[in-house]
Structure formats: C-alpha cells, structure tokens
Amino acid sequence: MAVKINAKGGFAKRFDFLCRFVSMTFAHIINPVSVSLKSELGIAQTITFETIRHAAETAKGKVDVQLFTICYPEDHEVIPSFFTRLPNLNRSVRDVLSNPNVKKYPLMREVFQSLYDHSQADYFIFTNMDISLMPHFYVAVQQLVQDGSDALLINRRGISAKYSNIAELPLMYAELGEPHPGFDCFVFKRSLFPKLVLADICVGVSFSEVALVHNLIAFAEKLTLRDDLHLTFHRGQEVMPPLEPITFGHNRKEYETKIYTLLKPFLQLGKFPYSSLTFPKRMLKWALNPSFRTHQLAEMEGKSMTRKMKHQLDVWRFRWLERLR
C-alpha cells in the first residue's frame, strides 16, 4: 500500500492507520454454565466450545485472538483448557432482586468490566453460549473491522436442531440455514466500554441484547450490521425463546427506566441499522426485529419528520420573502 506524505502530518496519520491493523487484537468472552450435557443448553454449549476452538485454530498466524470465560465457581468443571478463566463473578441478578429463586444470571457490566481489567485487546467479542462459530469467523471479523468500524453486529443463521454431536460439525458447517433477525454476536472497540450504560442488565435474558445494541448505536462512530454473512449459527430457528417473567421484567425495567433515558440524547435515526431504507421498509424491519423498540423509533421518526417539515417551510418562507423585495 502506498503511503503519501503531505504537509499536514499525513504520513503520521497513515502510519498510525496501518499499524492499528497490523497489531489488531481480539478478546472473545463467553459465560459457560454447568448443565446436563443432555439438555438443550448442554448440547449447544458443547458444540459452541468446539467451534470456538476450531475457529481459533484456523485464525492462528493470521489473527491475534484471546479466549476468555467468566462464570461462578460451580461452573468451572465445564470450561475447556484452551480458555483463560477470568476471576469468578461476584454478583448476579439474584442479588439485585434479592430473590434466591431466580436463575443466577450474571450482570453484563461485571462481565465486560472483568474483560476490560484483564485484557488489553483492541476489540471485544461477546456471544451467547448457544451461538456457534464458523471456522473462518475470527479471520472474517478482522477483515470486517478494517473498514474503520468500531462496532459490529453479526446475525446468526438458524440450522436444523437435529444435530447433537460435535462429530456432525461438518454437516452443521455445510448447512446454510435460515436468517435470524435478532442480535447475539457483538464486536466492539475496547475504548467504547467505559461509555456503555448497562445498569443492572443481566445476560442470558431478553432485553440484554436490546440494551447492548442501543449502547453501540449511541456511542459507536461507525456501527456495521452484517446480516448477509454465514459466520455464526444456532441449532434451531427459534426467534423468541420462552420468557422468564421475573428476570425478563427486571431487564425490561432496567432498560426502559435507567438505560434508555440516558441513551436517548445520543440516539440518532441515521445510526440505526436499516435507516437507509425507505420509510415503510425500515419501519417494517424495526418492527420485526426483537432488539428494537418500535414505539421509540416511531417517536424518533415523528420528530425527524417534524424537523424536516419545519425546515422546508422555512425554505419556502424565505423564498417568498426574497420575491417580495
């Protein structure tokens, strides 16, 4: 690649630009849980572990990838040796709700804070435990962020749920599957983490992805959605899993009352995925995507249209004033 020198420090800027990609590092964190290997999560988790190992092997010599897990002491037994274990989680949604009967879901902020404290990687990657990777995942992600994106949303493909063994991985890789509208694979620059408003959102429950995607829309300079690639997959094509009323209600309340209120001043329609589509198409896309709040987007659309109409009226008014001179 040719490097041009100009009088305004262009050489230094281009040199920094090139070095950034040469030394790019990624830290991928997941949150394993000790469950029966015959359960749906147990099967999915075993497959996820193997696909991450395979993708990391494929990336050797091409991408600097660090693999991390974070969990509670009782979950250590399921973690493969090729992961670096971060210190045990201290709190869960049980502590927030003071309810010992709810599942022990980790708090998203604690997960990312630990990764931030124990890794200096340029980019963080977070995926759910039932999301498996294609072998070329890390290599592709590195190439995707080379366009200057500081955040990526990568949509999964839903394949048949008939597979249950890692020996069937070649068939899983080969199945194209069906597209999925929601978000469960996030890549973002380390520098974005201190800006994120996560309150006490817990992972593993609906609205966690709503909170994270809206934070990235608010604070990323260039957020890129890739819903056209085959980089991750999920056994089964379920869009909305059964809701756990208490934890779902908690996450929803955290987002609506604590997170969205603080993010709202930073949310711009033009930064939302699909915003470049025509009005009917983008509203339909947003309405069908479980990660977006349609009424909030409709409110933003209304304000945007009002501003445009006011601007056009001002243009017409000043034109008439010119004619009356």
Image: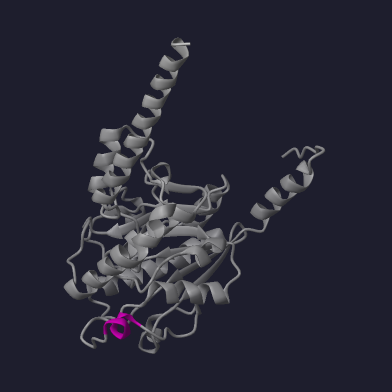
Question: Which residue lies at the image location 25% right of the left edge and 34% below the top edge?
Answer: 280
Residue 224 location (% of width, % of height): 46, 47
95 inside magenta stretch:
yes
Residue 164 to residue 7: above or below: below
Q: Is residue 320 left or right of residue 97?
A: right
- Residue 217 seen by the camera: no
Q: Would you identify the image quadrant in which residue 69 lies?
A: bottom left
Q: Is residue 36 left or right of residue 132?
A: left
Q: Nearer the viewer, residue 50 or 319?
A: 319
Which stretch did the figure color magenta?
A: 92-97
Residue 291 % position (x, y): 30, 55
Identity of the residue drawn at 32% across and 47% down:
176
56 vs 160, left or right, is right
Residue 213 in the image, given as x and y percentages of width and height: 38, 57
Instruction: Decide which of 145, 237 is in the foreground and name it.
Output: 145
> Where, by quadrant of the figure, is residue 184 drawn?
bottom left
Q: Which residue is at 21% across, 61% downward?
A: 162
